[in-house]
Every structure is written in C-alpha cells, then in structure tokens.
Image (tube, rainbow, N blue to C red):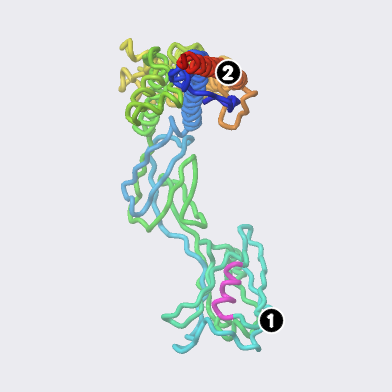
Amino acid sequence: MVSGISSTRLSGLASGMDTEALVAKLMDVEKMPLTKMQQDKSWMTWQRDAYRDTNKALYDFNLKLSDMKYTKSYMSKTTTSSQPNAVTVTGNTASSNGSYSIQVNELATAAIKVGTQSLGSSFDPDAALSSDLHGDITFSTYNESGEMVTKSVTIAAGDTLNGVLKKISDSDAGLRAFYDKSSGKVVMERTATGDFNPVDPTTGDNDGEEIILGASSFFDFVNLSGSVEQNGTNAEIVYNGGLTLTPKSNSYTMNGLTFNFNTTTTSPAQITVDNNVDEAFNKIKEFIDEYNKLVEKLNGSLTETRYRDYKPLTDEQKEGMSEDQVKLWEERAKSGLLKGDSLVTDGLFDIREKWYTEVNTGGAYDLITDLGIGTSKEFLESGILTIKDEQKLKDALRNDPESVYKLFANNEAGSDKGLVYKLEASIKKTMTSIEERAGKSTSTNQQYTLGKRLDDLDDRIDDFQQRLATIENRYWSQFTAMEKAMTRFNSQSMYLSNQFGGF
C-alpha cells in the first residue's frame, strides 16, 4: 500500500463490487513505471558491484607485478658443494658463475671465560644476592677496530645472579653471560667469533685477552676473577688454492657469494655456481598463469550471456516465490552485467597490446616472442598467453638472463621500460576509468557516475511514490463517492417502495 492514503474509504457494500481488488488492479497498472525504475536501480547496483569486482581482480594482479620487478626472479643462482657438511654457499644475482675450491684449515671461535670452581650444588641463582655485592661492576671487550669498549651494570637490592648475568648480556658489550646449573659455574663468552685483540706479532705485547673484568667482589664471588680466558680465534681458509683468508666469523662473502664454514676439511671442497634456470622459468610461468586468470575473468565478463527477459525482482515479486526460485531467477538476471562493456574491452585490449611492445634491452631478447611466449590460437582464449617453446625460454634464462630481466623489468624511462612496468601503467589507467564510473567501497554516490545516477533514480522513485499515493487516494475518493451515491439511491428506492406498497 502506498503511503499517504486517505483513511475515509467505503468498500463495495452498496455496489457489491470488490472495491479494494479493483483499486489494487488499477494501481498495478499505475505502478509499472515505478517497477521499471526499481529494476533499473537493482541493475545499476549489480553493475556497479561487477565493475568493483573487476577492479579487485586488476588490483590483485597488479600486486603480483611487484614480484616480477626484482632481478632475483630472473637471475637467481643455484649452488652445489662437494662437501656440504663442511662448506655451503649462497649466491645472489651478482654472483659469477663458475667453479671454486675452498679449503678450511681452521674455524673461528669465540673468546670464553669460565668460573674456576663451582658455586655449590645448593646454590640458588634466583635468590637475592648479598648486600656486600651491591654496586657497579665494569667489564670491557674489543670492537672490530681493536679498540677497548667498557660497560658497567649496577647490582641493586633484590638482584639475583641470573638477573645480573642478564644485565651483562643486555649491555651491548657483545657478551653472553649465564649460570650453568650442571657444573655450578658462571660462563662469560663473546657473542661474536674471532680474535679482536691479537698479540702484537713484532713485540709479543698483549696477552690477547678479549674479556677484561674490572676489580669487583662480584667477579670474585662467581670465581671469574682468576679465570684464564680461552681467546677467540679467526678462521683460516684457502680460496682457489692461492688466497689465504682469515675472517673473524665462519662466514665470508666475496664476488656475490657467501661461504659458510661448518667444519675443517682435509681436502678442498669444490663449489659450483650456475644460473637457477628452473626457478626463473617457474617464476615466469606462474606469472603468465596469473595473467591468464585475469584475462579469462575479463573475457568471461565481456562474453557472458545477458538474459533480457529476466528483469531484477522487486520485493513484491519475491514475496510470491520460493528462495530457490528467487536464486535461480537472479542468477539469470545478473548474467551479462558487463557484456560488451567498453571500459573493460578497452582496458583488456590495452593490456594485451603491451605484451607485444619492443623493449631495447641491449641484449638478444627485445620481444616476448623471442622467449618462445605467444598468444593462444584458440579464438575463445582471446589474449591468453602460452609458453610455446619451453626450451627457448630456458635457453634465454641460461645464456642471457640480464636481457630477459630487462625485457620484463627494465625501469628506464620511455619506450625502454620493461613489460611489467608497461602492464602496470595500463592496469592503473583501466582501474582509474572504472573507479570514475563505479567508485569504490569508500566512495560516496556523488563521487562516481553510477552513484550520481543512483541518487537521481532514488529521487525519481520518491517523487513517483508520492504521485502514486495521490492517484490511489483519487481512486478511493471516486469509488467512495460512487458508494455514497448508490447508498442514497438505494435508500430512496426503499422509501418509494414502502410508500407505494401502502396502496
């Protein structure tokens, strides 16, 4: 029932007509333009959501483009070691391919001090320390430049041994201090391996001690004051049989390769570095698969059948249908929301076109077809990419990965930009056009074209509903007037009948 209807109504008591049914049928005719507007509103709302769903797909793919901008996607390295338990190696995109030998004569060790005797089996490291141990304690270590660095911590009331050792470990001195329960001894060691305070080879000065403890009753109490330090040592490795190196850690980086030493060797470990063709190939293949999913979605939207006989249902129409009937109907009604849409068509065309632009890489591969990648011949797979010649792509990744990288991800200005950057620009352009028409979830209706049309439609619906209220009131007024007239006629007829009946 339309709002604003007069409360003074007479049903068909005098005429015998079903006045309410007659008015309802008349209003059904009058409501036809309103139904059309409500259906248009539903259609526009669905279409807006379909546009936004398309933009979501474009946005998600755009995120995947980021991974394809990095050299590691095309120029990762694979490494092998003949003695993986002793020497391992990792490479980056700058690593030179080739074979290397690594002889590990010595491993780097860290300086360590251990208490000279146990604190006793009954000692509790979590009990508060005696007050005569309270105060500042100092300790020193050496930095990378061989300079002494001194730190201090304060032992306060309530502090425990474990608490003080944690303060030392947290002091940025590069020390790890702890109480070993099984031996009952306190241990202090450097967190970094290497010899940071070497003995002067000329004069023999310096005992090489790296953990210097200040005079303190605390260090006396934990039996560290008289402890003899085991000094830290550098590693010793021989690279390719001719270069002896003494790094402070059991890791060494050179020429883009990071060597990690786990144990000494009796013979050199043989290291091989090569382009990781399979990983790069799979990365490109996965990227193409993601692109194809996007194209399939856009093609599906553009070619989806539109069932024009299945108009959006109004709330009144849904009342006479079951849930399954409504669901099946709306599946047809929502089909083809973007069929042949110009924004999606133009965007898809622009994206497909970018794949076939030339990029000046300075290498052997300037076009995607040079890598054995092309468009599917199937008509219904318009724009789908396929790797037509896998071996051709793998050979390119093996022989000139730099050129492949530039073809995809060159960040030079102008026409030399890689395909990924060109695709990104095209996608962002399409997303902007769609957003201007359909907005996004945070947009107000006045910020996009369809939203303005929806607002205008709402105003027209409100105006028409007011008009319907006036029309319905008029129908009821007319029928009520007729009923009143017929009531008067019937009364007069009865009166005259009674008068003539007396003769």
Image-based side of 499 in relation to 325, left or right: right
Image-based side of 162 in relation to 122, left or right: right
The residue at 59%/67% (across/down) is: 170
Q: Which mark is residue 477?
A: 2
Q: Position of residue 292 (x, y in %)?
A: 38, 22
- Select label 2 or label 1 by which is in front: 2
Q: Which amino acid, mark 1?
A: Gly
Residue 459, quarter of the rendered image: top right
Per the model, the C-alpha gap separating discs 2 and 1 is: 102 Å
Q: Which amino acid, mark 2?
A: Ser
Residues in magenta, as a range: 160-170
Residue 94, visible in the rendered structure = yes
Q: Position of residue 195 (x, y in %)?
A: 54, 63
Q: In the image shown, does 471 or 372 lie closer to the viewer?
A: 471
Q: Position of residue 151 (x, y in %)?
A: 66, 69
Residue 38 covered by magenta stretch: no
Residue 210, quarter of the rendered image: bottom right
Q: In the image shown, does 35 or 324 lie closer to the viewer?
A: 35
Q: Position of residue 43 (x, y in %)?
A: 48, 19
Counting residues from the start of the chain, the first of labels 2 and 1 encountered is 1
Q: Residues within 10 Å of mark 1 (few under 14, many from 20)?
A: some
User: So how many labels did they put on this image?
Assistant: 2
The secondary structure that most of the magenta stretch takes on is helix
Q: Which mark is residue 135?
A: 1
Residue 27, visible in the rendered structure = no
Q: Secondary structure at mark 1?
A: strand
Quick check: marks 2 and 1 in contact, CB under 8 Å? no
